[in-house]
Amino acid sequence: MPKPFLTPIKTMACPVISKQHPLILASASPRRKRLLNQIGLPFRSIKSHVIEKDTNGDPLETSLLLAERKAGQVRSKTGKAWVLGADTIVVIEKKILGKPQGKEHAKHMLNLLSGKEHRVITGFCILNPSGDVAGSEAVTTYVQIKDLSEQEIRDYICTGEPFGKAGSYAIQGIGSFIVETISGSYSNVVGLPLSTLIRTLISAGAIKSFPLSGSFY
């Protein structure tokens, strides 16, 4: 498993994240935005246009690579700011499941997951205001899916929720009914491992401590 990467302490000279200097989230994901709003971290969202390919290698390395690409692409549009890129992938039996391309693809993925445990990996990358990688890590959560009937799969696909979701389900939505147990970070499955992210932001010098004091808002 890739070790967390942090830059030297020199990043402490960069302005910390605040209302005046918000974090840039390199994503338009409503789930990631909801998570950052939940913890009260000042941010603004800019969608990246990185094509999520190169998914045939090690899934941990793949998630980190895509997260860094997303952060780097958006950083070129922002000027000096802390930038967060992230990529979430679902892995079952060494096969990476991306986002479904249609109903049949979603049905195939859900059949693969049915009755089995899989891994959800979110890699994230933080760039400091100078554009250097200040921290990156990939976090894994294990998720057990219940045995799904064909009717359950059809009905779930008809809700439209599987589309745009890695693995064709959303643990924070209707898809919670298919999840029996998880081992690891819940927020990681949603799209960001919040505990690890906050620890990394502090270590990188992006924030001084957490929770943020009222002076930051």
Image (cartoon, rainbow, N blue to C red):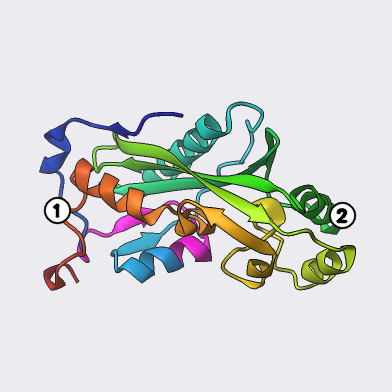
Which residue is denoted by mark 1 in the rendering?
208
Q: Amino acid at mark 1?
A: Lys
- Under circle 1, the secondary element is loop
Which residue is denoted by mark 2 in the rendering?
104
- From the viewer's perspective, tell me whether residue 110 is left or right of residue 89: right
Point out residue 79 in the picture as x, y percentages from the top left corner.
29, 47
Write down the region rendered in magenta. 19-33
Residue 61, above or below 153: above
Q: Nearer the viewer, residue 173 or 165?
A: 173
Point out residue 194 in the picture as x, y percentages from the top left corner.
37, 56
**Residue at the top extreme?**
57
- From the viewer's perspective, tell me whether residue 109 is left or right of residue 144: right
Q: Nearer the viewer, residue 139 or 135?
A: 139
Look at the image and say whether residue 23 sits in the magenta stretch. Answer: yes
Q: Residues within 10 Å of mark 1 (few under 14, many from 20)?
A: some
Q: Nearer the viewer, residue 106 or 143?
A: 143
Point out residue 70 in the picture as x, y percentages from the top left corner.
47, 43
Task: Please give the label number shown on residue 90.
Answer: none
Point out residue 98 in the picture as x, y percentages from the top left corner.
68, 46
- From the viewer's perspective, tell me whether residue 66 is left or right of residue 43: right
Q: Nearer the viewer, residue 19 or 59?
A: 59
Q: Residues within 10 Å of mark 2 (few under 14, many from 20)?
A: few
Q: Residue at x 77, y 54 (%)?
A: 110
Q: Earlier in the sequence, mark 1 or mark 2?
A: 2
Q: How many marks?
A: 2
- Under circle 2, the secondary element is helix
Q: Residue at x 47, y 41 (%)?
A: 67
Q: Amino acid at mark 2?
A: Glu
